[in-house]
Amino acid sequence: MSDTGPLFVSSGDLIADRRYKWALDLAARGDFSGAADVLEQTVELASGFATAWFALGAVRDRLGEREGAIAAFAQARDADPEDYHGARLQLARLGVGESAPAMTQTYVKRLFDQYAGRYDAALTERLNYRGPVLLRDAVEAAERTAGRPLHFAAVLDLGCGTGLAGAVFGPLADRLTGVDLSPAMIEQAKSKNLYDNLVCADLAEFLAAEAAAATRYQLILAADVFVYLNDIAPIITAAARILAADGLLAFTVETHSGDGITLLPTLRYAYGEPYLRGAIAEAGLSLLTLDQAAIRTERGVPVDGRVVVARASTVVPRPISSDP
């Protein structure tokens, strides 16, 4: 199974659990037909066992049994409203249901909690990840053009993860704040002593709380984060509300040749250039940079991406009021 494949979650039936583990062992040895047979027996014993249904979908997909995979993923989706394994994403990849469904918080937490311990090595050594460095270069160019020093009183790192962007931008900030949904990623970031403040929270909820508190940042970053959101326009607008006058929003995304949003086979979202321009304009920001760049590679092939920098107006937005 892949890094994003099923983990063990008990069905509550000891025999079903044992069969499930046996099936994973068979799959690990390359016996996908045998694994499918055992998983079919497993879900007969425990029809609500979402994890086994998901594994069956993955195995059938590996065997090229598209309709069987769809049926199994649909059962996993129906058995688990929180979509722990991302069955809705797999169905979308196979052309069923929403074309770009949102990832649930439960799925995202599971994905990155599982990945946290090897995240840095995977991105920098296997995927040639360059997001933070590309963002720094773009931010430096924007500030140089504006005749400003490359230094910020307060920087916010959205989806900070283990702190890869924090390591690059920390020396440029008087105060560096990071926020991430994954507790395990936050713990990795804490161990590096890069941030003045780290918060484990949903991005939209965090930004809303900062706006209510009238907090301002001179620079807001989002490095390789928006690829996990199926609509970034609300986040861009929320970030714009807490930018200081002339503050910068800088982020990376993966892109595609059309408009709108698409879910890639990698289960990451890509955005068309017209969508990006529209989201920046709707947030009241001025687009400074929309550069094509390979933020990372996938199986040795550069991934089409964009480095985006936008600037707030010289007028600080009014704090959001709860008054009618």
Image (cartoon, grey):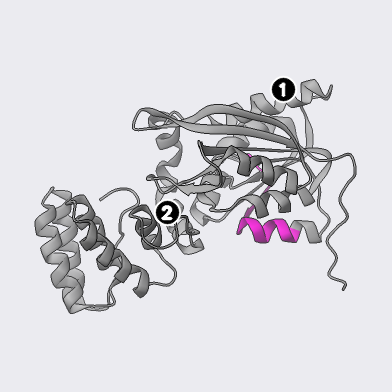
Q: CA distance from mark 2 to mark 1?
A: 34 Å
> Which numbered tag is attached to residue 273?
none
The percent coordinates of residue 47 (x first, y second) are 24, 78
Residue depicted at 44% across the width and 28% down the height: 128
The percent coordinates of residue 13 (x first, y second) are 22, 78
Residue depicted at 52% across the width and 45% down the height: 227
Quadrant position of residue 66: bottom left
* For residue 168, side relative to residue 298 (left or right): right
The percent coordinates of residue 9 (x first, y second) are 31, 67
Q: How many C-alpha atoms fall within 10 Å of the one at disc 2: few (<14), some, or many (≥20)?
A: some
Quadrant position of residue 78: bottom left
* For residue 27, side relative to residue 195 (left or right): left
Q: Nearer the viewer, mark 2 or mark 1?
A: 1
Amino acid of disc 2? Leu
What is the magenta range? Answer: 194-209
In the rendered image, the quadrant that contains the C terminus is bottom right
Amino acid of disc 1? Ala
Seen from the viewer's position, the closer of residues 228 and 14 is 228
> Which numbered tag is attached to residue 111?
2
Q: Is residue 52 visible?
A: yes
Q: How many C-alpha atoms fall within 10 Å of the one at disc 1: few (<14), some, or many (≥20)?
A: some
Seen from the viewer's position, the closer of residues 307 and 107 is 307
> Which residue in the structure is indicated by mark 1?
141
Q: Is the residue under label 1 in contact with that under label 2 (CB below 8 Å)?
A: no
